[in-house]
Amino acid sequence: MRLTGRGVTLLLAALLIVVLTAGAAAAWALGRQRVDTSTGSVGYAAGPSADRSIRMVGGADDHPRAEDIRDVLQGYFDSINNRDYAAWVSTVSAAQSSAQDPQRWAKEYSTSVDSNLVVTAVSDDPLRARIKFTSQQSVELAPPTLPADCIDWDVTYLLSDTDHGLVLSGIDPSAQSMTACG
């Protein structure tokens, strides 16, 4: 069977509809799995501050585990700001702490001061918390991809339960950004 010009046009149109429908379905499915970022900027203004306490905004404090999440994040950032490796180890999973020996950790965080800590979203399956914060550090100890003395972060931490309570177990790599303070 040979297709005429009109037949080819109809075939290509049908194929285009199938491809567009499949793409739309895939985009919808992918979009359903992403963390809701609609409350990402509620109650947050970028930049360093004197406030080093965890604040929860945009409904994050309504989550059933909000207090546990606030406590582990406060312990995590306090340990960095106070240069307390032992306290830091108690806030992260064994896999996280085993990747950082005390000397390396002390060097990497020796100039870090984290402030303006705002949890903007909490979600489940897996449990995760989106937090925006500002980190000040010497340029030499900044991330190599952004050598700046002040960085505004937007990070989603993964959290998990252990025998000793809730800990940070990693960072969602698809939900992380950093910009120089400005």
Image (cartoon, rainbow, N blue to C red):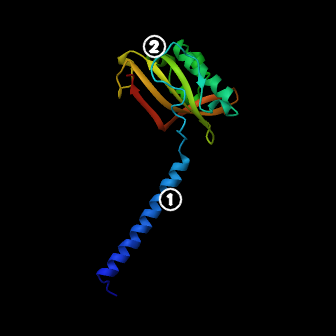
Describe residue 92's horizontal placement relative to residue 181 as left or right. Answer: right
Q: Which mark is residue 110?
A: 2
Can you say which quadrant of the picture contains the C terminus? top left
Q: Nearer the viewer, residue 93 or 4?
A: 4
Distance (Cα) linking label 2 and label 1: 48 Å
- Secondary structure type for disc 1: helix
- Mark 2 Cα-neighbour bin, 10 Å: few <14, some 14–19, many ≥20: some
Of 148 and 84, nearer the camera is 148
Please name the residue that numbered disc 1 is placed on. Answer: 25
Residue 131 visible in the snapshot? yes
* Point 48% across, 24% down: residue: 45
Instruction: Say which element carries label 2.
Output: loop
Q: Earlier in the sequence, mark 2 or mark 1?
A: 1
Q: Is residue 128 visible?
A: no
Give how far across and how far down residue 66 sits, in percent: 66, 29
Q: Residue at x 57, y 16 (%)?
A: 78
In the displayed image of the protein, which residue is found farthest to the left?
A: 5
Report the amino acid beneath label 2.
Answer: Ser
Which residue is drawn at the image coordinates 31% and 86% (left, top)? 2
Q: How many marks?
A: 2
Q: Are marks 2 and 1 in contact (CB under 8 Å)?
A: no
- Three-letter amino acid code at the position of disc 1: Ala
Residue 41 coordinates in the image, percent (x, y): 51, 31
Above or below 5: residue 168: above
Label 1 neighbourhood size at 10 Å, few (<14), some (14-19), many (20+)? few
**Residue 170: percent from left, percent from top:** 54, 33
Can you say which quadrant of the picture contains the N terminus? Answer: bottom left
The image's mark for residue 117 is none
Counting from the top left corner in percent of width and height, residue 130 is at: 55, 32
